């Protein structure tokens, strides 16, 4: 009986990895799109604001992925 309780408690404490996978796929798709646009368009992100926005978006994606994986593993 006690063993069943511990098994149920362990399953309840398990955190879903699905949000990490979804965000990881979105980050990958974003990176591919940015890479393709950067290679095909010579004037891609020429302005300082556009470049800063791309960098900020990439940093937010990376931090969110890192935060989610730490959350899931702890």
Image (cartoon, grey):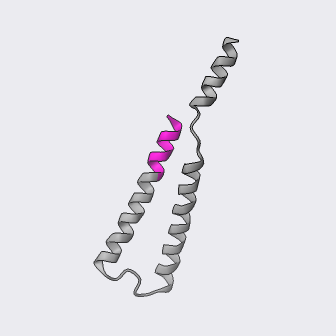
Which of the pair 59/10 is nearer the observer? Answer: 10
> Residue at image x 59%, y 41%?
16
> Residue at image x 31%, y 81%?
47
Give the extent of the magenta segment.
65-74
Q: Which quadrant of the rendered structure holds the N terminus?
A: top right
Question: Could you tell whether 41 is left or right of 6 in the image?
Answer: left
Residue sitting at the far bottom: 42
Q: Position of residue 40 (x, y in %)?
A: 51, 85
Q: Where is residue 38 in the image (x, y as percent from the top left)?
A: 46, 79
Residue sitting at the far left: 48
**Residue 56 within the segment the image draws in magenta:** no
Q: Above or below — where is 9 with respect to 46?
A: above
Q: Where is residue 8 in the image (x, y as percent from the top left)?
A: 65, 24
Q: Position of residue 52 (x, y in %)?
A: 32, 71
**Residue 69 within the segment the image draws in magenta:** yes
Question: Could you tell whether 34 is left or right of 46 in the image?
Answer: right
> Residue at image x 63%, y 19%?
6
């Amino acid at each position: 009986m006690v063993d069943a309780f511990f098994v149920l408690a362990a399953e309840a404490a398990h955190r879903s990895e699905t949000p990490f996978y979804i965000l990881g796929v979105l980050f990958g798709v974003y990176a591919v799109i940015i890479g393709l646009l950067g290679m095909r368009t010579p004037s891609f992100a020429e302005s300082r604001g556009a470049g800063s926005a791309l960098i900020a978006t990439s940093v937010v994606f990376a931090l969110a992925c890192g935060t989610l994986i730490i959350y899931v593993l702890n």
